[in-house]
Image (cartoon, grey):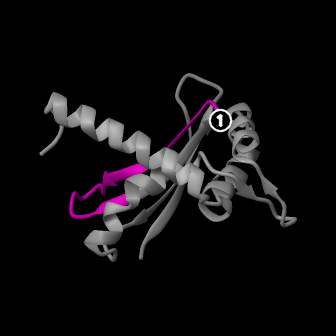
Amino acid sequence: DEGSCHVDSVAGTKFCRVDACASTASLTLTQREHLPLLAEMLMKSPIREDDGTTTPYDVAVERLRKETVSTTAGVAAAGDGTADVFFVGAKLDDLSKGATILKRATRQAVFVPDRLAAAVSKLSLELQSELRDGNSVA
């Protein structure tokens, strides 16, 4: 599978963006259906630190809030429109923190039952709202 990492300055600001993406072409339909849950969980989970300790959810989220201007994760169409990519990224004012933030999100997030339940509940409510509005559901 192809993957890439992108670093860019945000025009007219002192901020930069750090993004990583990976093709989802080799995933099964069932696996792809779980990507919205993964996107919801990556930046909102406890973190298994390099020393083996686990930083609790609320501490990890607060640290991320202090280190970044914004974060994002999700699925998007690839540039050529032939496949989807999964992406995770952050806007920050200190580029040196970018790799650490992406590493924590993609390699050190710990998915625990109570956070998974909260994420599923949130996504369910969002889906219900989308279905009621009817504008963006195919």
Residue at image coords 38%, 61%: 34
Is 78 contained in the magenta span? Answer: yes
Q: Is residue 105 left or right of residue 83?
A: right
Residue 61 in the figure: left or right of residue 37? right
- Give residue 61's quadrant in the image: top right
Identify the residue at horizontal 16%, vertical 41% (top origin): 137
Type of amino acid at the residue the image marks with label 1: Leu
The quadrant the C terminus occupies is top left
Q: Position of residue 76 (x, y in %)?
A: 33, 51
Compared across the picture, whether 128 is left or right of 59 comes to left
Tell me the crowding category of disc 1: few under 14, some 14 to 19, or many 20 or more residues within 10 angstroms, Cα based: many
Q: Which residue is mark 1?
A: 92
Q: Quadrant of residue 70?
A: top right
Residues rendered magenta in the picture: 69-85
Residue 53: x %, y % from top left: 84, 61
Q: Is residue 21 visible?
A: yes
How many numbered circles does the render carry?
A: 1
- Viewer-proximal residue among 113 and 31: 113
Q: Look at the picture and state if 87 lies above or below 134.
A: below
From the top left corner, tell me how far across and down residue 31 is, in percent: 35, 70
Task: Decide whether residue 83 is among the magenta residues.
Answer: yes
Residue drawn at the location 33% of the way across and 36% of the way down: 126
68 relative to 44, above or below: above
**Helix or strand or loop: what does disc 1 sit on?**
strand
Depth order, front residue of 91/119 = 119
Closer-to-camera residue (3/43): 43
